[in-house]
């Protein structure tokens, strides 16, 4: 597996069906998967601003938070094109994506709501395995409440995989 190819890279078009990753150095055989994205002028401007602009008068306040345990239980329906992935791999992919979601949430949840929305959880599971056609969750049964002084720990994930 060529893990050095993971991430975002500028590319050079080699021919109609191939491109090279500028600045990457291979460490294995790739699976010939991935996505190429053409930056717009707006993307390039935003990237430049993010890298070079320093805001004035920013004060960092460190706040302690309590990690909250949570569980995700349900059934994931996938197409037969996932034949190369075991049920454990499909569950592991979803678990990793959900842990990253929890890690990216700010203290107190999304926006001012104090919640992690159920639909965000379902969407994260969908995106973890692109061949997913349906996600039915029994837990959580609704949006996950997060208090102002709480963050979510990585979830305990129990999924049944059904191939359709």
Image (tube, grey):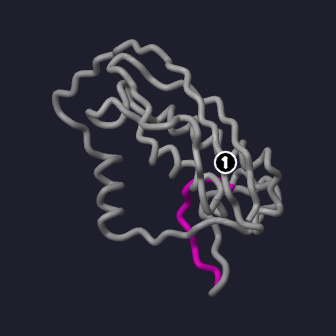
x and y percent of residue 129 in the render? 65, 56
Please give the range of residues in magenta. Answer: 5-15
Magenta segment: does it hold 10? yes
Q: Residue at x 58, y 44 (%)?
A: 137
- The vertical placement of 149 against 89, above or below, is above
Dot 1 falls on a residue whose secondary structure is strand
- Quarter occupied by residue 127: bottom right
Q: Residue at x 59, y 43 (%)?
A: 97
x and y percent of residue 22 in the render? 60, 63
x and y percent of residue 26 in the render? 75, 57
- The vertical placement of 107 against 160, above or below, is above
Q: Residue at x 74, y 51 (%)?
A: 161
Q: Quick one: quadrant of the C terminus?
A: bottom right
Q: Residue at x 30, y 65 (%)?
A: 42
Q: Quick one: quadrant of the N terminus?
A: bottom right
Q: Which residue is mark 1?
A: 75
């Amino acid at each position: 597996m060529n893990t050095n190819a993971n991430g975002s890279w500028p590319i050079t078009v080699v021919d109609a069906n191939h491109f090279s990753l500028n600045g990457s150095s291979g460490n294995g055989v790739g699976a010939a998967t991935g996505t190429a994205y053409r930056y717009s002028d707006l993307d390039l401007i935003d990237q430049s601003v993010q890298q070079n602009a320093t805001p004035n008068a920013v004060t960092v306040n460190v706040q302690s938070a309590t990690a909250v345990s949570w569980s995700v239980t349900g059934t994931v329906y996938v197409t037969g094109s996932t034949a190369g992935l075991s049920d454990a791999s499909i569950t592991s992919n979803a678990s990793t994506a959900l842990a990253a979601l929890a890690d990216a949430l700010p203290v107190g949840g999304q926006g001012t709501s104090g919640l992690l929305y159920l639909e965000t959880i379902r969407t994260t599971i969908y995106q973890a395995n692109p061949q997913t056609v349906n996600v039915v969750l029994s837990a959580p049964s609704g949006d996950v409440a997060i208090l102002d002084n709480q963050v979510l720990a990585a979830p305990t994930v129990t999924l049944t995989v059904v191939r359709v």
